[in-house]
Image (cartoon, coloured by chain):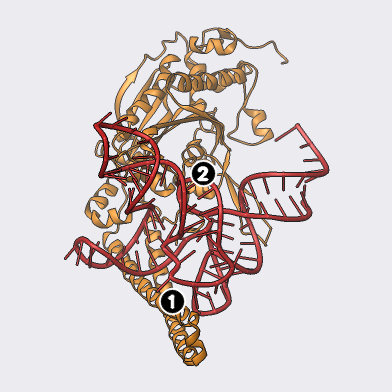
Chain colours: A orange, B red
Amino acid sequence: MPPGRGGFNQGEIDMLDVKFVRENLEAVAAGLKRRGVEFDQAGFKAIEEGRRRALTSVEQLKAQKNDLSRQIGILRRDPTNMVSGLGNSKINDLMGQVNSLSMQITDKELEAKKWEDDLWNLLKNTPNLPHADVPEGLTAEQNRQVRAWGDKPTLPFKPKTHWELGEALGVLDFERAAKITGARFTVYRGAGARLERALLNFMLDLQTNERGYLEHQVPLMVNADSMFGTGQLPKFEEDMFKVPFRAGDDKAEERNFYLIPTAEVPLTNLRRGEVLKEEELPLQYTACTPCFRKEAGAYGKDTKGMVRQHQFNKVELVKFTTPETSYEEHEKLVADAEEVLRRLKLPYRVMLLCAGDMGFGAAKCYDLEVYHAGTDKWWECSSCSNFEDFQARRANIKFKGRDGRTRLAHTLNGSGLATSRLLPAILENYQQADGSVLVPEALRPYLGGVEKIFAPPSGR
RNA sequence: GGAGAGGUGGCCGAGUGGUUGAAGGCAACGGUCUCGAAAACCGUCAUACUCGAAAGGGUAUCGAGAGUUCGAAUCUCUCCCUCUCCGCCA
């Protein structure tokens, strides 16, 4: 059984659509294989057939039971039956029959539940199928570069890393962040804090004023239903920070909130369980939020600097579309994210991820990688995915078409962008020989016209 | 935190144990009428799963979960949410 089949209140157990899998077994297995997932076709078939057999007999038994109960009702309503006493013996007889049916039902239900558990276990960790455009490959090496923009800065000196610059300029403080919280946290100070705020405002203004996204302020903690809807649960529980809301209260069931790993979760779940109107699509939502990630499994990786943190800020873009337009909207979404980098004049490249490198729910995904002069590396600063109906099925997000039909919507999202990869790029690419950092022109209005960040007088 | 009142279909709103998936109204959709429209009238109007070639059946769903009962929208318990009053507070 899915954890809380009732808890996830849509009653859906499908990750992929069970009916679709049943009818396209070969194709599903082939698609999953591209992602490096071995799908047990025979197992699925056996479980799925068993489940339906059990379900059918449960339903037949219930139909009989309902019918007999109805007859009891009819007998008891009719006074002539009751007076004669004949009614009572009939009723007793019927009640006996119902009782024996009830026992059979209990048995069959247990069996059906067992099959459903098996099916759930088989499907819960099954990712989405890759779109036909997605290149073959299992690791990042097989990602395909589709375009690049901008030139790497030519610095006539050995460029410093952002953590070197940040500390020298007094704008980033990793040591004290570690003291007050722990590793993988950053304190921004002075011009650093202001630069961060400027970046976020700049990106939000761009996406809302020019690109048609509706700004939101959302809760930074969400419930399990939401995490399931966008696909973080059940598979990635250990990657998220859980906040027990009611621990130790044995009268109540355990209830947890989760710190959002991305604003995709609250934004997409805003429409969970709703039927949208085709006329209003595509819906374009954005929010600027901190993101919280445990980064389990990344121990010892990228420990320097701010590129891999437990908390970072991001402007997120989310779209709800029809199946017919989602790929077109996907391209536009990528362009919206790219525009940020272009205006900041940061060199980047667009990678089309191969089947094995995509996230769990994605059918097609582009990563934007920005160049960091200090480490001489390309860093992912945005990931733009089309989930097709994968999230919509889990979160029960539909739309009513102009033809009157109600179908699952498509959901998309992408970062627009993450500052933990952007701010280092600015510091490293815009650094000057004297150790100062130029402010990209697009950001200057957001910094009160400041053009350059210098080291502050000592002692501040 | 204390005291109350509630949560029913797209919306409003009946329903307090029995052929109730749920009266009535509004909205929506199709039609009649009209040169056209409005009005009026007639009809259709939940979702998921499942059986079936189809026609058409069946099961589940009245905030969620568990229980009582032959039978629950209706009774019991727990939880969630909303509203009102009091208290506290950024």
Compared to A352, does A62 lie above or below?
below
Compared to A164, does A313 lie above or below?
below
Label 1: how many residues lie within 10 Å, few (<14), some (14-19) or many (20+)?
few
Percent across and percent down for residue B20 are 45, 67
* Label 2 chain ID: A
Percent across and percent down for residue A157 are 47, 10
The foreground one among B35 and A279 is B35
Q: Which numbered marker is on residue A70?
A: 1
Q: Which residue is mark 2?
A: A296
Residue located at (24% from left, 39% from top): A132
The kind of residue tagged 1 is: Arg
- Whether residue A273 is visible: no
Q: Quadrant of the N terminus of chain A?
A: bottom left
* Label 1 chain ID: A
Compared to A215, does A182 lie above or below?
below
Question: Is residue A361 left or right of A290 when viewed as pictured?
Answer: left
The foreground one among A69 and A83 is A83
Question: Is residue A358 left or right of A28 when viewed as pictured?
Answer: right
- Whether residue A259 is visible: yes
Q: Quadrant of the C terminus of chain A?
A: top right
Q: Which numbered marker is on residue A153?
A: none
Find numbered disc 2 in the image and state the secondary structure of the residue it sits on.
loop
Percent across and percent down for residue A210 are 44, 18
Residue located at (49% from left, 40% from top): A270
Marks 2/1: CA–CA distance: 57 Å
The kind of residue tagged 2 is: Ala
Pick whichever of labels 2 and 1 is earlier in the sequence.
1
